[in-house]
Image: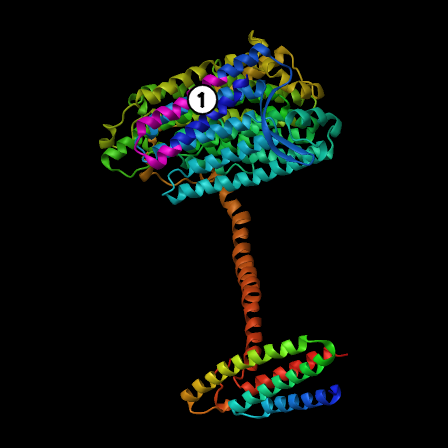
Amino acid sequence: MSLVWLVPLLPLFGFVLNGTLAFTRPQAKTAVSLIGPGVLLAAFGAAIVVVKDLVAAHPAAPAVFTYWDWIPVGTLHVTAALQVDPLSAVMILIVTGVGSLIHIFSVGYMRSDDGYARYFAYLNLFVFFMLVLVLGASFPVMFVGWEGVGLCSYLLIGFWFEVTANADAGKKAFIMNRIGDFGFLAAMFLIFQSTGALDFASVFARAPGAFALGGGTVTAITLFLFLGCAGKSAQIPLYTWLPDAMAGPTPVSALIHAATMVTAGVYLVARTNLLFALAPVSSAVVAGVGALTALFAATIALKQWDIKKVLAYSTVSQLGYMFVGVGTGAYAAGVFHLATHAFFKALLFLGSGSVIHAMHAAYHHTHSHDDAQDMRNMGGLRTYLPWTWALMWIATLAIAGIPPFAGFFSKDEILGAAFARGASQPIWYLFWAFGLVAALLTAFYMTRMMLYTFHGPNRTGDQEREHLHEAPWVMTGPLVVLGILSLAGGALNLPALVGGNAWLERWLEPVTTASASLLPAADVSSGTEWTLIGVAVAIALAGIVGAIQLLKPAALVPARQAPAEAGFGKVLANKWYVDELYDRAVVKPITWLSRVVLWKGIDQGVIDGAGVNGSAAISRALGWVGSKLQTGEVGFYVVLFVLGVALVLRAAIR
Amino acid sequence: MLLGPTLAVAAVLFVIGVAGVLVRRNAIIIFMCVELMLNAVNLTFIAFAQTLGVAGQIFVFFVMAVAAAEAAVGLAIVLAIYRHKDTVDLRNINILKG
């Protein structure tokens, strides 16, 4: 376990090497291909060793490794320390494992890009910060990772910064995240004020004494923390940056904007589960916002044509599910869904990357400028990309919640927990219903995406069609591994109902035990549980069958000839006009304030006018008076001189 | 030597010097008036040296040395001005003004 420092340090090492290569020898692609995924695989190996030690030791308290004093100021004493406990163990395995697969995929996907070394440098740096985030033993160390992943997200969204839209998308993500980071910081200040510590062990040890159950302070702290989570994990009202973040390379979307970084918010709630258990109002807010986001994002995904936008809104929606889980107090279920989602969503994104790769190559051959990501230009790709097609169907069934795929178990567990909580707090029945409707929509829009992409007639174009081909093995290989994980990932946490032993839940028990004593999990009878499962599966099937029945891929036309959307479909295609609403309500007023009041009024008027030019005018007037004294006549000077002497003598002789 | 009359003579000399500097326009005459003031001060030093010690007399030597140097430099400047402008009237030498 003492090797834990190696886990984040290996990707950092990779960042340094790749960063140096990006500056000195950007064409050394073979070296970059070895270093980039190599350090990740090594980190994965180190993570396995660490987790193996943890399994063997199975300590009740987290194993903390302190390296140096970071901020020793007065009573504030922050050390650079990492901690290994069951929760961070799960996270480092996901981050390095799924990360390795995505790095390998990137070798094929980004190989022909000029910024290949720069890309892997950023990607390695991201993994380093993500590992610091999940391994940090205190809020400030975690915050370093939290900010670092935000930085890397910004750098990678704007990776192709020559296009203004991409650079703008990066800035949007960065600014939205700043709003959330303000919440994280405010929460840290409040935590330090009330507990006098910032490391997890001390805070959680003192929390039951420092906070009253449902008290104002702990509610404020948790709500501020959740504001941070809403920014990082793209929840209402701060979700709009994630769909725009699809401007980055597709493997980045898979790694950062689906599997790891956006789940940091869920991790934070699970990490501070004791605080959230002490603040029932905040937990309800978390679950409510999660449920609303799950439903809201799912409706938008129904009408998107960009294959990555569908997946982006799907990610927002699935993150909502995770927050329903952790908000309900089913922390293990939330983390379970985090893990399975990492598998199937990474698979979906990488699959879409494989599709875009093929489309892009085809258009590149014929010098066409059609949109390689628009599903209206695809269709019938099953014959050209058989592996991708089969693997993406596995992921689709997993996300839709069809047994025995991974997503079924995790989603069902979250919905079951929400339903069980409804018995004591009826509002949770509403959250459960939201989740159920979102599940129906999820099955529908995912099937829609698969139908329009892979089935029906091909709409790519007659010349382009000949150039469509399956991706190389370096890209399909990771897809196969993720496919197996999406298929069997549910085995991590098989419920007792079907003869499993809820392995993940028991593994996470040391982390959640303190909050579980405050808020015992509500149980429902096994009969109810079976009914719930039946309802969930029926709804998922209804979504899939409904999509197959209702949608006509054969009737689609390529994007260039497509008619404009009308009616309610237009509202959904335009994402409920939320971006426009934010633009009117926030961006425009701030621009007006900056331009008219702050720039023209305060800067030009007060600071430039009164301040700079005003003082210049005063000194010029004084100088004019002074210059009039310089007559150039010696006699005049002498008179002044004598007068001066007389005055001095008058003052001296008294 | 009588202190009072000596100081009175020195004061009269000094006031004549000041008045000359103030009212005359000829650079050489102003120069001479400045010398007059210096010598008035010298006289004061000598007068006080009778009672207060030899330091006053030492000072007089310094003043004379400096006055000699000043006279040399000052007359050289006046000469240069005269060559340049054909006059030593200070009313015509007023280009250094703001």
Rendering quarter of residue A102: top left
Q: Is residue A37 magenta?
A: yes
Q: Mark 1 points at which residue?
A: A98
Whether residue B10 is visible here, answered yes or no, is yes
Q: Which of A523 and A219 is in front in this view?
A: A219
**Vertical position of residue A34 compared to residue A618: above or below:** above
SS class, disc 1: helix
Q: Of the residues shown, which amino acid type is indicated by label 1?
A: Val
Q: Which of A613 and A214 is in front in this view?
A: A613
Whether residue A340 is visible here, answered yes or no, is no
What span is colored magenta in the figure?
A19-47
The C terminus of chain A sits in image quarter: bottom right
| Percent coordinates x, y for residue A192 in the rendering | 68, 34
| Percent coordinates x, y for residue A318 in the rendering | 51, 27
Rendering quarter of residue A11: top left
Q: Residues within 10 Å of mark 1 (few under 14, many from 20)?
A: many
**Vertical position of residue B35 compared to residue A573: above or below:** below
Rendering quarter of residue A391: top left
| Percent coordinates x, y for residue B78 in the rendering | 47, 86
Helix, strand or loop for the magenta stretch, by majority: helix
